Amino acid sequence: MINEIEIEIDEEVFLPVYRPLLDNDDDIIFLWGGRDSGKTHFIAQRLLMKCMSASYFRCILIRATFATIKDSQFQTLWDLIEDWGLTHLFKRRSNPLEIECINGNKFIARGCDKIEKIKSVKDPTDAWYEEGNQITEEQHITIMTTLRSNKAKVQQWFSFNPECDQDYREFWLYESWTGDRPGLWSGVKTMTVGDESVELRFTSCHTTYNDNPHVSLERKAIHEYLGQRSKYYYTVYTRGLWGNKLVEDQFAHQFDEDIHCSSDVVHDPNKRLFISIDFNISPFAIIFFHNWKDQRGEHVHVFDEMSIENADIDKVIRRIKETYGPWLPSCGLTGDSTGNKKEIGQRDHSSHYKQIKKGLGLKPSQVKTPNNPTHQNSRVDCNYFLLHFPDFKVNKDKCPNLVRDLNFVECKSSGKIIKLNRKEENQRADHLDTFRYLVNTYLKDWIKRHMKFHGYTRKDKVLSGSQMDEGFKKFMDSRSK
């Protein structure tokens, strides 16, 4: 078997911005930024060179779904092989999807939708994550902790545009690795493995189409045209900077982080504790808040949340008691009214709420669970509340899931919340539901009083920000007066 292939590739084939990376041996290399910056092409070039020159090389091509690899990384590599006139040195296979060099080195395609197949690859040397922003932190951790080889050091390569389906400031690639720092820079992340500390060296390289001299004038014109049409797409695709996706029809269209979020919102032992629950197997969503009146007016402060994966009622009860046990005797509790249904699996067919009342030691008067409102009516109430209530605040640091849902959960044209795919965080809406139950149980009377005082009736239906009637617009205008 041929161990190494001697071939000369002129350095001029590599874009100047990436040439400092040719000899980079950091553990993880992030190439990110705008479109047409040549990052995918460079990684293919670099790995192809390594495949031919290394005595041992086995690279996993990774994307969120296996079916997309053939038309992306796999095809990019094969196009490069053809452009360099190297087809006599490589074979490509469809089943399994691989590209193998005559020296025995190879590229192996794997998708995160079947992550166990990534874990089964023996002795990898490299992993290339294309569209790395579509991969979850959990998937990356699972893969990263299984990438090991006794034959060579493992190096990970990421290529992606900086977009995500949540607040990018809480997205793992931004928060843990790249931040919003442009240019080429290196860092070290220390991780604890047992009793030992391990240092991971990484490089971040941010580029845009301006770093690619081969971009045509037509493509440049398209990029600059985005600046006139869409601030978001211009920020992400042209400037290559992190940005939040525009929500077409946001459920909580009156939510404003500048107005409704405060790190000063904390649990006050002297105020009554309130709890709102949404029943799901995974996650079981809970928010904790205070609701009180004083000489300054009325207040609702959400200071904490829980998101319990793979939960059962006993686990939920235990977590609540461990955290807020001393304040339970006087607390108020609300949530999903379907929790009043009898559970066949229970010996006495008791409902979720009956189990919770018993487990937390609550009196019947402490639990209020009115019928769940329709999504359309709830949307009217929630946005009216957000717009007019004098002091509603959320602790963003302690309640990231609630803030995410208020920012990103969308509705259909009918006003119904979109919950089609629970794999998409913005379609889970579990913590949004806890907020809806809070409003439905404890703020309906306030909303009715406020509407009556200002001459606005509940018969006026409001489906979205774009469908608001004139009566509701008056109340929107009042915010700025």
Image: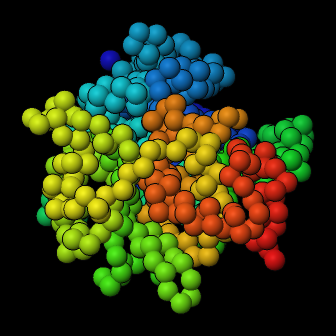
- Residue at the location (50% across, 55% down)? 440
In the rendered image, the residue lying farthest to the bottom is 295
- Residue at the location (36% across, 21% down)? 104
Query: What colour scheme does the image use?
Result: rainbow
Picture coordinates of residue 277 (x, y %)?
36, 53
The image quadrant where one finds the N terminus is top left
- Where 89 falls versus 465 (above or below)? above
The image quadrant where one finds the C terminus is bottom right
- Where 57 falls versus 102 (above or below)? below
Q: Nearer the viewer, residue 37 or 321?
A: 321
Picture coordinates of residue 217 (x, y %)?
90, 40
Q: Is residue 99 left or right of residue 382?
A: left
The answer to whether residue 158 of the structure is visible from this angle is no
How many marks on residues?
0
- Residue at the location (36% across, 40% down)? 338
The answer to whether residue 277 of the structure is visible from this angle is yes
- Where 200 falls versus 120 (above or below)? below
Picture coordinates of residue 108 (x, y %)?
40, 24
Q: Nearer the viewer, residue 126 or 419?
A: 419
Q: Is residue 468 left or right of residue 192?
A: right
Picture coordinates of residue 74 (x, y %)?
53, 23
Q: Nearer the viewer, residue 30 or 314?
A: 314
Q: Quadrant of residue 180?
A: bottom right
In the rendered image, the residue lying farthest to the left is 347
Q: Nearer the viewer, residue 302 or 71?
A: 302
- Residue at the location (77% across, 63% down)? 455
